[in-house]
Amino acid sequence: MPRTKNLEATKETKAPKEPKAPKEAVIESKIERPKTKIELMKEALAKQPKRSIMIPLEPNEKKGLAFETVQLNGYTYQLMKGVYVEVPEQIAQIIMDSQKQTMEALEAAQRQVPNADRLELDNSN
């Protein structure tokens, strides 16, 4: 009889079994991974205020067919030239800095060429 009491005591001390989760739920919880730098950049750009900018066409480019590519930490932005587009503030700053550097380089080059040899640029598109 002591043996029966011992079995009953072990039955009482066991914790009740919890219901098993479906296999799909277990798999989904294990798949979560850290975000890539590209995903983080995309989210950061989406949160920034938007600015309207236009990238001018080059003389040989046609409206609607010319694009400018900007890459920022692996995230690529393609912008149509010759039209105003809404872009995140950081992308707008990159474009404006690039245009400023181009203008400064052109001005420096023109200062080095004598007046008689200068070419006039026609930007009347």
Image (spheres, grey):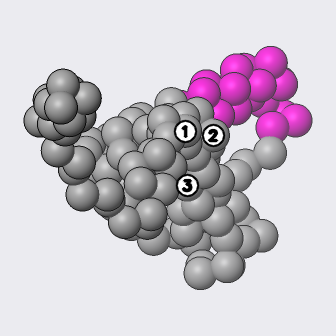
Are dots 1 and 2 in contact, CB under 8 Å? yes
Q: Determine if residue 22 is in view.
A: yes
- Where are the magenta residues, as a range? 99-118
In the picture, the quarter occupied by the N terminus is top left
For disc 3, the marked residue is 77
Instruction: Kindly check if marks 1 and 3 are in contact, taking CB atoms under 8 A apart as contact.
Output: no
Looking at the rendered image, the quarter that the C terminus falls into is bottom right
Relative height, residue 8 to residue 101 (above, below): below
Report the front residue among 89 and 114.
89
Q: Which residue is mark 1?
A: 36
Closest to the camera, between mark 1 and mark 2, is: 1
The amino acid type found where label 3 is placed reads Tyr
| Dominant secondary structure, magenta | helix
Q: Amino acid at mark 2?
A: Gly
Q: In the picture, residue 59 is in which quadrant?
A: bottom right
Q: Quadrant of residue 77?
A: bottom right
